[in-house]
Image (cartoon, helix red, strand yellow):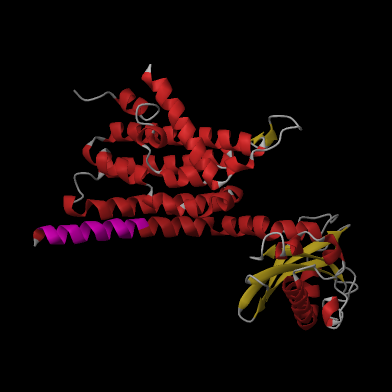
């Protein structure tokens, strides 16, 4: 009996100590980890969209609460004036959920660029959505809220198809058009918050 | 006659170098050694866990009841593994993306549990520390060497710098899974020839 008690106590104390230590470390590293994930997962897409901006869009970000979740918006400045805003939208592709970063020019409401952040599409087929220049540039300049144009050509829109990966291309277009409706709904909030980064 | 601390440290570097002499802990050895950087990163993460777990197990060896020693060791090891995972996510996220699932899998790396059970639970603090360091550095070296062989032949680079000039045709087989077995087998063979004398 005494041995039993001793075993229970030892394990409990050990587990409690370990839990306490880990939650302390998790608490103190969570900010750093969030920053690292932004840099490595969304960073490449953000930087490719925002080429030539004069600030670091990953540091200059703000959040808006949408459906109970804080959504990140990244601000791109030219000569100190916030001009671009980038945010992520999602849609289901061929192999699962895809994340698409959409950069919008706040003055004109046009798409400045798109970039795939996370996907699980077939390598070499659907994965070309990340790299296919013709596909990516066909988004540029379209009004982000124009749902009829932000569709692939097969569906009567203006977006170039990716040969052999129609489902992926359609998913990216859908994500962008979702980003458009989100932009429409929160446009004034986005603009006010982005203004605070000027100077 | 007990071995000196220096001997405990040295045995991990050659006599008992884990993947080559004991052929233990092969899962990460084969899976992550596609480049030198990944190999050494994985080795250092394992070394950290090994050293910390060895020290703590050795300190607690008279407190832990023998019947539940393995669960206790696992808790200790798992704690340090999660610690490494969090720190790596915070400060070396690129490496974390490359190593992925193999970081949490250090918990079940038999080198780590093996040292806790076979050595640290029976020895004093300093020898256990030396043992952990020695085995850990040996493990890191083996992963680094295997990574170097595979990366240079399979990709033509070392630490991402080209080593064989522009005309080199990469032998891609080496960075794929079967190549890991072949490279490990050849290194074991060389180790045995060198060890024979």
Residue A161 belongs to the span the image colors magenta: no
Please give the range of residues in magenta.
A3-18
Q: Residue at x 53, y 47 (%)?
A: B177
Characterize the magenta stretch by its predominant secondary structure: helix
Which residue is farthest left?
A: A1
Is residue B64 shown above or below B129?
below
Q: Quadrant of residue A154?
A: bottom right
Residue B31: x and y in percent read 50, 47
Q: Residue at x 27, y 58 (%)?
A: A13
Quadrant of the rendering where the C terminus of chain B is positioned:
top left
**Residue A176 is at least partly visible in this image:** yes
Q: Residue at x 75, y 77 (%)?
A: A174
Give left or right: position of A174 versus B129: right
Give left or right: position of B53 versus A130: left
Quadrant of the rendering where the N terminus of chain B is positioned:
top left
Closest to the observer: B159 or B121? B159
Q: Residue at x 20, y 61 (%)?
A: A8
Closest to the observer: A197 or A1? A1
Closest to the observer: A97 or A191? A97
């Amino acid at each position: 009996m005494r041995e039993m008690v001793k075993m229970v106590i030892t394990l409990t104390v050990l587990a409690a100590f370990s839990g306490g230590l880990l939650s302390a470390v998790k608490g103190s590293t969570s900010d750093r980890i969030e920053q690292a994930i932004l840099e490595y997962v969304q960073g490449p897409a953000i930087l490719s969209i925002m080429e030539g901006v004069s600030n670091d869009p990953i540091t200059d970000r703000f959040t808006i609460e949408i459906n109970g979740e804080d959504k990140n918006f990244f601000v791109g400045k030219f000569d100190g004036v916030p001009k671009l805003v980038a945010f992520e939208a999602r849609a289901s592709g061929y192999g699962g959920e895809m994340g698409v970063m959409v950069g919008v020019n706040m003055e004109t409401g046009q798409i400045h660029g798109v970039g795939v952040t996370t996907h699980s599409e077939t390598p070499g087929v659907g994965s070309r959505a990340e790299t296919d220049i013709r596909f990516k540039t066909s988004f540029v300049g379209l009004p982000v809220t124009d749902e009829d144009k932000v569709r692939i050509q097969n569906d009567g829109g203006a977006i170039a198809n990716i040969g052999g990966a129609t489902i992926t291309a359609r998913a990216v277009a859908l994500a962008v058009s979702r980003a458009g409706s989100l932009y429409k709904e929160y446009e004034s909030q986005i603009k006010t918050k982005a203004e605070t980064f000027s100077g | 006659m007990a071995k000196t601390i220096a001997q405990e440290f040295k045995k991990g570097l050659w006599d008992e170098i884990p993947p080559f002499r004991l052929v233990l802990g092969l899962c990460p050895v084969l899976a992550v050694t596609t480049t030198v950087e990944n190999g050494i990163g994985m080795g250092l993460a394992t070394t950290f866990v090994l050293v910390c777990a060895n020290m703590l197990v050795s300190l607690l060896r008279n407190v832990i009841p023998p019947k539940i020693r393995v669960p206790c060791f696992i808790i200790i090891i798992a704690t340090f593994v999660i610690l490494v995972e969090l720190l790596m996510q915070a400060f070396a996220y690129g490496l974390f993306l490359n190593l992925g699932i193999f970081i949490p899998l250090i918990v079940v790396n038999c080198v780590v549990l093996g040292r806790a059970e076979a050595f640290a639970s029976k020895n004093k603090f300093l020898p256990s520390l030396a043992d952990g360091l020695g085995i850990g550095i040996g493990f890191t070296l083996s992963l680094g060497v295997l990574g170097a062989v595979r990366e240079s032949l399979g990709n033509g680079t070392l630490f991402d710098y080209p080593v064989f000039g522009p005309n080199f045709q990469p032998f891609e087989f080496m960075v794929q899974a079967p190549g890991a077995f072949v490279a490990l087998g050849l290194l074991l063979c060389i180790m045995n020839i060198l060890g024979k004398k």
